[in-house]
Image: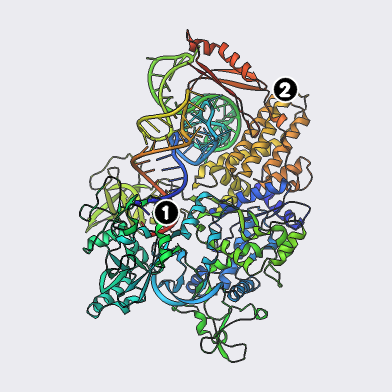
RNA sequence: GGGGGAGUGGCGGAAUUGGCAGACGCGCAUGACUUAGGAUCAUGUAUCUUUAUGAUGUGAGGGUUCGAAUCCCUCCUUCCCCA
């Protein structure tokens, strides 16, 4: 009866049926425990790549598992659809961003459906639709009302390439994180969110099960440092406030440094120095932040011709301006203590400024002349008046006795005060581009600002806008949008900045709850049941962006009362812990990245002649690597190919640049006739997939060839979920065989003979062991080991059938259990097999098999006998063995007698077997001589 | 420079309150079936040697321990984040 496993037909059939029956509709049901599983929503770039599959299908498998174990699971999907790529694509292809985005969404939806995920499509949310962004604007309005959103002039990151401002998080190494183009600093009036408002709460991760790496990154990103604020004064009396984490070194301050953008620079600069200083400030403005911060760079700066008074000892110290001090960090001014800060030290050496040690480590006598670098370690204070002799440790903040003492004194005397500084700056949300959510603000006469009333939301993004980038928002030039009236009916202009798209994606998990709701951003009835997200999966690259923004957003939502109704319902339903809503996602797991596989380039021999610096080839032949060298005919592996230029490298490492002439004869074994230049394959390193490198794995092709189930299972099997790695195409065969074997087991004959008790118990044992291990691995995101266990069960079932010693009942029981365990991984084939075994539709609505430890337990264990680290014997023993019995057996064993010889054991150590998933580990006896 | 990961066969990877290293799979080898094999089946597959109750072996070196891939120290390589 054996029918071939036709994955295409099976997958199509069941996808249709599931959709028709709505088995993945996800509805509130207070009678059941809930599980909100969320995976990061994609940007509609146009094509689903293998990375999307790697992120989504394991998450889907886990959501399915949770559902089978009795949870009511919410697992939604949507699109993060505003943003620059759409606008850029639109500019390039001369179509509207709507059009580009929507046709991409259409296409990706179709691709997503082929995955066989349990997404509830009726909950789909798309951030660029008015029904969605109306509420993004509504949140902005609430934040504006409560002061969480404000407008301010600030030095911002301006990208000349993108013609827009970027948030700090989007600037990496002084370059835009997406295009890698330089970003410059510019003063502009912009909209901000008070990111720092919840900063201490954001440092608290106690409620969260998040990867340690993300917690570390967010902590560092927020960058809390304890110290003191101290006010110095210029000779004319202008206060210059500084922040320092090392108030204990105040007596060692020998000069001050202002950031080039510091407002006092111009006022304090002496006339004779003005020209120099202004030139320096102008030059600094052209440098990127990264350049300015680099420690190995020469520390430039100029003296402004004025002095300040150090309040702790009334000393006059010179004031400099230097670009290693940032206006955005602290107050933009520092006291420089070259003896105890490395950057100040380098600056002082460079400009022959005084270095005065004020902390002396045990047994050392530092002087300015003997120091070769700053001393940032422990010691005792010197030259510090009343504090001489105070102990300084390496501890930070008040934990350091010297720092604590000085802070207390600063507060007493009023010279300074204790202060905490954060690296984190407020969230700049303005963007001067078209394709984003409009900021619902109207500018009236003068500086009057009013928000658009809620009943006029959404402020629609107008169509028919010229959106070529010009450096200001394209909306300014669109009169019908720009010109409006204020609440008094007077002419006014509309805010033309749009919002950072990270804002749209900061609250999408709430919109999924009721994506078409036109009364509120989300339905509190749904929210009270589903929130917060229980498990969130996505890429770690969002550590300091999306994952921090969304934590801020949840708190801001709570602050403006967005959860009030939700909380009431929660309490009425007995969910008392309503504070949990301030955290959006309780558990986070980051999947790794699937990289392009390494590939050797073609090894070629070229014929032609040397012309200037490159070799012009009229013949290129792909040859085996070991081919002998022919003089005058360069050969080597193609390391790189740009158009018709090949970069060859031979075994000795010699490189040759070859230009392949237009009508050159190109021979590639296996290809008939003359090949094209672009059929010559260059070397590929293991790296991120990208179209330009030609190492992209197309999931559609894989699905067509192997089926979605195989692709899903292979992605889960071949990698550690949290690590990822290079795509190895060959390995998929193992998974393909596995599913074909499962198919064959279900299709094949059912045993007809009578069962043998021990064989049946063995099969039952293996089944229950597999239940335990598969459950554990799904729970722990260890998808690869789960599938390995499933494969092992396949092996056992095949062996059991060959031996023909189990009854039909025992056989079918094992087979059914295996199919239930398979359902989360490979939903289509599992459904088909389940139907063929006569199971009740749908397999995805069945209960997860129940694990019984008694049935899983092996009756016999192997007692492992060690002498030191070496195994000297093994004995089969009953699982019930105790310490006495094990030691006696061990000492009497052949191996031990031989190993001991005439010696007496000094000690005999017994380690009982530990209960693990599905079994008990083997006990161990170690004989010590 | 600082912080955080990672390093295990030819390859992907498994094993963590310290207890038989290499599960599961790919690849490879030998054999079977076959007109054929990039199908299927069986067996084998860490390394070395003097081929067995053998020795060595988890990036290198050291330490703790009856026992270390796992814990500690130093170093190397590599990835990520930050500066």
Measure how far apart labels 1 and 2 are at the Cα level.
Answer: 66 Å
User: Where the N terminus of chain A falls, by quadrant?
Assistant: top right
**Residue drawn at (72%, 58%), measured in percent from left and top?**
A529
Element carrying mark 2: helix
Q: Which residue is labeled 1 in the image?
A: A396
Eye-nearest disc, 1 or 2: 1
Visible residue check, residue A434: no
Of residue A439 and residue A808, the one placed in the foreground of this image is: A439
Q: Residues within 10 Å of mark 1 (few under 14, many from 20)?
A: some
- Taking depth in this image into account, of A624 and A850 the one nearest to the observer is A850
Q: Position of residue A845 (x, y in %)?
A: 75, 48
Q: Position of residue A619 (x, y in %)?
A: 31, 52
Q: Earlier in the sequence, mark 1 or mark 2?
A: 1
Farthest-out residue, top: A902
| Residue at left offset 40%, top offset 66% | A413
Which residue lies most toward the bottom here? A490
Q: Which residue is mark 2?
A: A758
Q: Are discs 1 and 2 located on one and the same chain?
A: yes
* Above or below for A46 versus B2: below
Residue A314, percent across and down?
30, 68
Instruction: Give the image quarter of residue A202.
Output: bottom right
> What residue appears at the point 66 percent right and 35 percent down from the top-left corner?
A770
Mark 2 falls within which chain?
Answer: A
User: Who is closer to the viewer here, B47 or A695?
Assistant: B47
């Amino acid at each position: 009866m054996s029918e071939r496993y036709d994955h295409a037909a099976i997958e199509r059939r069941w996808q249709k049926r599931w959709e028709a029956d709505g088995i993945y509709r996800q509805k509130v049901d207070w009678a059941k425990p809930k599980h909100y599983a969320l995976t990061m929503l994609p940007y509609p770039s146009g094509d689903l790549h293998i990375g999307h599959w790697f992120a989504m299908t394991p998450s889907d498998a886990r959501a399915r598992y949770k559902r089978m174990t009795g949870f009511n699971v919410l697992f939604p999907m949507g699109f993060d659809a505003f943003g620059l790529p759409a606008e850029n694509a639109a500019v390039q292809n001369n179509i509207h961003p709507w059009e580009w985005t929507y046709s991409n969404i259409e296409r990706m939806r179709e691709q997503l459906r082929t995955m066989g995920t349990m997404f509830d499509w009726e909950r789909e949310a798309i951030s660029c639709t008015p029904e969605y962004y109306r509420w993004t604007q509504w949140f902005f309005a609430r934040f504006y009302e409560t002061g969480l959103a404000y407008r301010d002039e600030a030095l911002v990151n301006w990208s000349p390439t993108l013609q827009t401002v970027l948030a700090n998080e989007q600037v990496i190494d002084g370059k835009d994180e997406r295009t890698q183009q330089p970003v410059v600093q510019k003063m502009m009036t912009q909209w901000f969110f008070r990111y720092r408002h919840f900063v201490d709460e954001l440092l608290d991760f106690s409620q969260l099960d998040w990867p340690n790496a993300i917690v570390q990154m967010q902590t560092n990103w927020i960058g809390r440092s304890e110290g003191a604020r101290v006010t110095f004064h210029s000779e004319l009396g202008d206060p210059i406030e500084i922040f320092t984490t090392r108030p204990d070194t105040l007596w060692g301050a020998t000069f001050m440094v202002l950031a080039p953008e510091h407002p006092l620079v111009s006022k304090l600069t002496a006339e004779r120095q003005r020209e120099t200083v202004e030139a320096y400030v102008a030059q600094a403005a052209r440098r990127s932040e990264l350049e300015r911060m680099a420690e190995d760079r020469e520390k430039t700066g100029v003296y402004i011709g004025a002095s300040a008074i150090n309040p702790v000892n009334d000393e006059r110290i010179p004031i400099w301006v230097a670009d290693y001090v940032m206006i955005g960090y602290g107050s933009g001014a520092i006291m420089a203590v070259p003896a105890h800060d490395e950057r100040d030290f380098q600056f002082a050496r460079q400009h022959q400024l005084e270095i005065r040690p004020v902390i002396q480590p045990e047994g050392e006598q530092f002087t300015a002349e003997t120091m070769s670098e700053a001393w940032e370690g422990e010691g005792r204070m010197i030259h510090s008046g009343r504090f001489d002799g105070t102990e300084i440790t390496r501890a930070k903040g008040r934990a350091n006795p010297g720092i604590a003492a000085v802070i207390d004194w600063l507060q007493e005397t009023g010279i300074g005060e204790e202060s905490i500084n954060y690296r984190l700056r407020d969230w700049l949300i303005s963007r001067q581009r078209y394709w984003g959510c409009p900021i619902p603000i109207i500018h009236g006469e003068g500086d009057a600002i009013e928000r658009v009333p809620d009943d006029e939301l959404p402020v629609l993004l107008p169509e028919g806008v010229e959106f070529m980038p010009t450096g200001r928002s394209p909306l300014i030039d669109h009169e019908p949008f720009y010109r409006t009236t204020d609440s008094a009916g007077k002419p006014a202009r509309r805010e033309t900045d749009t919002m950072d798209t990270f804002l749209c994606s900061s609250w999408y998990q709430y919109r999924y709850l009721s994506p078409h709701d036109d009364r509120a951003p989300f339905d509190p009835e749904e929210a009270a049941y589903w929130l917060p997200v229980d498990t969130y999966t996505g890429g770690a690259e969002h550590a300091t962006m999306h994952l921090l923004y969304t934590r801020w957003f949840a708190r801001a939502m709570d602050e403006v009362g967005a959860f009030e109704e939700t909380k009431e319902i929660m309490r009425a339903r007995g969910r008392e812990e309503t504070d949990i809503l301030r955290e959006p996602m309780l558990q986070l797991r980051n999947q790794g990245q699937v990289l392009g596989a390494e590939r050797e380039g073609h090894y070629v021999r070229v014929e032609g002649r040397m012309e200037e610096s490159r070799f012009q080839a009229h013949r290129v032949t792909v040859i085996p690597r070991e081919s002998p060298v022919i003089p005058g005919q360069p050969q080597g592996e193609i390391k790189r190919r740009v158009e018709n230029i090949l970069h060859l490298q031979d075994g000795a490492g010699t490189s040759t640049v070859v230009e392949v002439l237009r009508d050159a004869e190109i021979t590639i074994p296996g290809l008939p006739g003359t090949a094209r230049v672009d059929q010559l394959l260059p070397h590929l390193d293991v790296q991120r997939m990208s179209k330009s490198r030609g190492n992209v794995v197309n999931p559609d092709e894989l699905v067509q060839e192997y089926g979605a189930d195989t692709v899903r299972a292979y992605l889960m099997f071949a990698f550690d979920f949290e690590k990822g790695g290079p795509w190895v195409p060959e390995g998929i065969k193992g998974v393909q065989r596995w599913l074909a074997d499962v198919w064959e087991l279900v299709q094949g004959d059912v045993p007809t003979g009578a069962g043998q008790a021990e064989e049946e118990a063995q099969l039952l044992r293996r089944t229950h062991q597999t239940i335990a291990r598969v459950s554990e691995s799904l729970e722990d995101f260890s998808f690869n080991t789960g599938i390995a266990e499933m494969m092992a069960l396949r092996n056992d079932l095949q062996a059991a059938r060959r031996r023909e010693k189990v009854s039909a009942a025992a056989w079918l029981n094992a087979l059914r259990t295996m199919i239930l365990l398979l359902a989360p991984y490979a939903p289509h084939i599992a459904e088909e097999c389940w139907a063929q075994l006569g199971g009740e539709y749908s397999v995805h609505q069945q209960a997860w098999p129940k694990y019984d430890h008694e049935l899983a337990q092996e009756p016999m264990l192997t007692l492992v006998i060690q002498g030191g680290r070496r195994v000297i014997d093994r004995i089969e023993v009953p699982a019930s063995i105790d310490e006495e019995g094990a030691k006696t057996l061990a000492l009497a064993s052949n191996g031990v007698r031989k190993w001991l010889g005439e010696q007496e054991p000094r000690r005999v150590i017994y380690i009982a077997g530990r209960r693990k998933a599905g079994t008990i580990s083997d006990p161990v006896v170690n004989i010590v001589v």
